Image: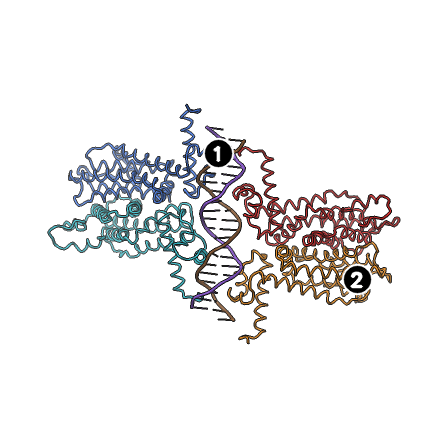
Chain colours: A blue, B cyan, C red, D orange, E purple, F brown
Amino acid sequence: MPRVSQGYLDSRRRQIMDAAITCFARHGFHRATMQDIVAETGLSAGAIYRYFRSKEDIVAAIAAEHHAAEAAVLAEWPGGDDVAGALRHLAGVSLGRLADPAEQRWRRVTVQVWGEALHNDRVMSIVRRGLDEPLQILAELFRQGQRDGRLPEQLDPDGAARVCASIFQGLVLQQAYEPGLDVQAYLDAVIVLIDALAPTPAPSRRSRSSRQQQPGGSPPDPAGQEFSVR
Amino acid sequence: MPRVSQGYLDSRRRQIMDAAITCFARHGFHRATMQDIVAETGLSAGAIYRYFRSKEDIVAAIAAEHHAAEAAVLAEWPGGDDVAGALRHLAGVSLGRLADPAEQRWRRVTVQVWGEALHNDRVMSIVRRGLDEPLQILAELFRQGQRDGRLPEQLDPDGAARVCASIFQGLVLQQAYEPGLDVQAYLDAVIVLIDALAPTPAPSRRSRSSRQQQPGGSPPDPAGQEFSVR
Amino acid sequence: MPRVSQGYLDSRRRQIMDAAITCFARHGFHRATMQDIVAETGLSAGAIYRYFRSKEDIVAAIAAEHHAAEAAVLAEWPGGDDVAGALRHLAGVSLGRLADPAEQRWRRVTVQVWGEALHNDRVMSIVRRGLDEPLQILAELFRQGQRDGRLPEQLDPDGAARVCASIFQGLVLQQAYEPGLDVQAYLDAVIVLIDALAPTPAPSRRSRSSRQQQPGGSPPDPAGQEFSVR
Amino acid sequence: MPRVSQGYLDSRRRQIMDAAITCFARHGFHRATMQDIVAETGLSAGAIYRYFRSKEDIVAAIAAEHHAAEAAVLAEWPGGDDVAGALRHLAGVSLGRLADPAEQRWRRVTVQVWGEALHNDRVMSIVRRGLDEPLQILAELFRQGQRDGRLPEQLDPDGAARVCASIFQGLVLQQAYEPGLDVQAYLDAVIVLIDALAPTPAPSRRSRSSRQQQPGGSPPDPAGQEFSVR
DNA sequence: AATGAATGAGCTTTCATTCAT
DNA sequence: TATGAATGAAAGCTCATTCAT
């Protein structure tokens, strides 16, 4: 029998987390003070402690939200036995998200979270889950591809999965440093790599997602569209 | 204890930086206190401030040392026009360094430095230099490979350079979380990728750097040795 | 304790300044620590910093209050063209204030402020204002007296103004060293000087403000009363 | 049986005191660090502690030297029964010293010493001696003048002595704030005051020490010369 | 439920002084 | 004698958190 609606409570919580993200992106977890968050929120110090038990709780909540958003990317994966297609899809979706300018703030927070995880078990377990699950799914994908004969036998599936994770993580880091970074060029290079690794036998591979649209010409391959970031 | 040698002074400075690295790896830049460093050093608080003007100075010195060590990797690069060879060499050397268990402490500090750079101009400029220089060298390498016809034309050189950087950065991050990570498997996967991207025309050369030594066998390919991490 | 009145806030500020004055009078600006002030106040360290940004701010606030109190003395000056009367009035009021035992604590702080001003621009500007304004007013007064023929022509108005300031400043210093100093005797001497400099033409008026009340006695001269300190 | 001559020792001591005066004038007693003095001296920290047991000792030595220099002024007083002459002499000599630009550094230190005395018994006793002795001499001078009928009876000798001290102290303070202050104008005003208080019966009083030398004319009165500062 | 003044442990840094060389 | 690296207590200040209102 709350005095206020759950919706009210949720929106206050949201408000605090948004303010915290702004502050953490601006100054980092440790340099951003609760007072900063209080000021950004427009609430009072006491109010914030009604919604979060501690500053660390806010950090953990942000890290968890972060992880949930990324887990959703994998959940969207359609499955199927086309390894190259799956990789292209995952690359397009996961890297594509990083192109959204509205999410730039997150880049900086993510890098903070990485550092925080090393000294904060709660955050670590959240981060680990966000890394280990994709690694397993990717490794399984590579194993499947090898069974299907579409990928070189000597490719270590676990190593390859980690390389994929790196390709995602590295872009996060590089974007934190350079918000205007050309994500499409990055994604194009990744697609070329995927094509090289698992060549599509059929008609000549495309440069479809290249930033320079072919001058004359047929409409771009709809499949390529999927990985386009712009 | 006056009139001491420059070597004495240098070793004190080293001692402080080592202690600081230990403390920062353990607790992070912000949670590690000067008292922690004092205790780890065995010196007094005042002594530390003879060698560094502030805690931030220690962080900057560590970041700079870090950068110098990584710049040295690129400096060792032999050059030449064999793109695939160059990539394999760089991968072997730069990722190989990360396999050294003695350097594990660094992984954790590096991740801290990434976060610190976002809010500390001095550290940022050090980090940026450590990223931008390799990016330019790699992009030039890719352009060269395209001119030579050894790499697909549609590969964006800048994007590809960033992907390479990511492959390095991601491993650093993943190692920070999992010190026992199989660097060799990771490196093997990278080599497979390189080979796929820039196939060596000659007789099939394979699986040489695989961890599972071929059961019956001729000695491993000496070229593969170069990229072996163990 | 939120949502407190402005009066509450003001009284806290007052409380801190009073405690600081006590501590500064006791030990000087530099030897008095924030902990001393904290203890004297009965508040916590953090509380003090809600009202003042730094120790130096407290010093500046005290110096400013000090200056304001002294400026008020000049503001009370009735004006008029009776030079000798004006000087007597100013001497009586400004030196009279120094006789108040309740203000003894201030003497010691004032001397500290003088020293502090030399190395602290903020305090210096406050002190300078408190000196320069009176100097100008006094110099103008002397010029007026010379125009009126009531003061010797060869008197340098600026020099004389500074001598007047000295007569005030010296008493402050001497009182800091000797709280029980006989202010009335000092004031009497000053009045004699004024009378000598600008003799009142009329019937001899004398000894009125002398401490030794005339034994048999008509009520004291009301004019003299004005300069009496007891 | 010292290894080095006494002269060497003395000159080191002098060197340290000079450096300390420079540092104290620059930053004040508390803000000037021993390291500042070490740097200014060109000696080492250890060396300074061979000559002074503590920083406070240096302060005390400086205050004592200061006092000695001022005591010398009184010692030069020729005596005699000409009250006005004596006052003029003392004013000329003591204020005249303050006009020496080479001594400007002292002004700032003196003001520091005043503040220090309040919280440092050693310095206080030095300062008190430097104040009480002149006060007694001056009071006696005034009493003498009253006995001789040259001074108004109603002048309180002790009060008047303190006013004289103030005239000196105030100039020190004002000079600390304004090194370029016109000491001659100040001295002129003081002479006018003395003349008003103890008029020289004889030939018409002069404006001899006025800064504007009479255009045409006889050489200035040698007696006036005595109080001239330029 | 909200406020925001208050708390106080703990932070980084300084600096007078010492003493091994 | 002289050096200057080392000491370590103590300084000013911060900030996550609490709780009376």
Which type of secondary structure does the marked residue at label 1 adopt?
loop
Q: Is residue D63 visible?
A: yes
- For disc 1, the chain is A
Assign the N terminus of chain B to one quadrant of the image. Answer: bottom left
Q: D226 left or right of B208?
A: right
Residue found at the far left of this picture: B216
Residue found at the far front of this picture: C215
Quadrant position of residue D225: bottom right
Q: Is residue A181 visible?
A: no
Q: Is residue C217 above or below residue A217?
A: below
Residue at mark 1 to residue at mark 2: CA–CA distance: 74 Å
Residue type at mark 2 is Arg
Q: Which mark is residue A44?
A: 1
> Label 1: how many residues lie within 10 Å, few (<14), some (14-19) or many (20+)?
few
Disc 2 designates what residue? D208
> Label 2: how many residues lie within 10 Å, few (<14), some (14-19) or many (20+)?
some
- For disc 2, the chain is D
Q: Where is residue F18 shown, x and y percent of the image?
A: 47, 36
Residue type at mark 1 is Ser
Q: D154 left or right of B5?
A: right
